[in-house]
Amino acid sequence: MTNIELNNVSLKLGDNLILDSVTLALPEGQYQLTGKNGAGKSTFLQLLSGLIMPSSGSLNVDDRPDLVADSIQIPDNMTVTTVFSLYDKYQRCDTTQRSQLIAAFQFSDCLTATVGKLSQGNQQKLKLILALSGNGHWLLLDEPFNGLDSASVAMLNQSLAGIQRPSIVIDHSEQLTNLRPRRKLHIDNKSIVLA
Ligand SMILES: Nc1ncnc2c1ncn2[C@@H]1O[C@H](COP(=O)(O)OP(=O)(O)OP(=O)(O)O)[C@@H](O)[C@H]1O
């Protein structure tokens, strides 16, 4: 079991207190993270990914999760193939699964393009392909349906219904069909509650 544990975690960004002394144990499972605009959902996933550090308290996430989020920036001038080669160099992807995802997302025409020339939806598909085939244990998805066409929305829902890895999804756009039941994690008033 690779649980996520927060012990008395507080997080401040500038003058903004986002989390206030949060203690939480998340067993492996499928979660949906909710909360009003600005509550701190995206920031919480960045914290779990190690992109930002707690201001105080301790956080235990056993390995590096795979994150899909707007905050993940891939250099515009790289071709998609170069991005994949870099991931291969550091063995961060399952290449068989990646090939399956490229086919399923109808992404093969994009392989020679530079990232900056991809449409918003195709940039999102690239992030999803990298994360869904990634070797991290937890999968963290911040608005994963952004920019996807209807076939890709269906594909992603199917993929999320079948994954073995623990995951947390933020889905304001309500396109997640919950083919598989998800426990609710709710952020409110600088606290996180597991329903
Ligand atoms: N670098 C920063 N410095 C100061 N405050 C920040 C910074 N980044 C984000 N914030 C603030 O942190 C709070 C939480 O932002 P976050 O994006 O995590 O919320 P969210 O719940 O994901 O919101 P939404 O539903 O609108 O996407 C917001 O009030 C935001 O303005």
Image (tube, rainbow, N blue to C red):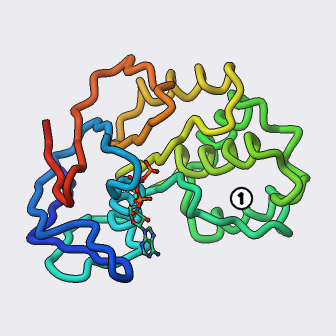
Q: Residues within 10 Å of mark 1 (few under 14, many from 20)?
A: some
Question: Would you name the residue on which mark 1 appears?
Answer: 84
Could you say which is closer to the camera, residue 50 or residue 55?
Answer: 55
Percent from the top left, x then y, of residue 146? 61, 39
Quadrant in which the C terminus is drawn: top left
Q: Is residue 55 above or below residue 144?
A: below
Task: Identify the residue at the far front of this view.
Answer: 15
The secondary element bearing badge 1 is classed as helix
Q: At 56% from the left edge and 63% from the top edge, which residue is drawn? A: 71
Q: At 16% from the left edge and 57% from the top edge, which residue is drawn? A: 191
Could you say which is closer to the camera, residue 176 or residue 92?
Answer: 176
Q: At 54% from the left edge and 40% from the top edge, which residue is drawn? A: 144
Q: At 14% from the left edge and 46% from the top edge, which residue is drawn? A: 193
State left or right for residue 61 relative to residue 117: left
State left or right for residue 40 relative to residue 51: left
Total numbered labels placed on residues in the image: 1
Write down the quadrant of residue 86 in the picture.
bottom right
Write down the quadrant of residue 54 in the picture.
bottom left
Q: Is residue 46 above or below residue 113?
A: below
Could you say which is closer to the camera, residue 67 or residue 93?
Answer: 67
Q: Quadrant of ligand 1?
A: bottom left
Percent from the top left, x then y, of residue 183? 22, 32
Q: Is mark 1 within 8 Å of ligand 1?
A: no
Percent from the top left, x then y, of residue 106? 77, 30
Percent from the top left, x then y, of residue 157? 50, 24
Write down the quadrant of residue 168 in the picture.
top left
Q: Amino acid at mark 1?
A: Phe
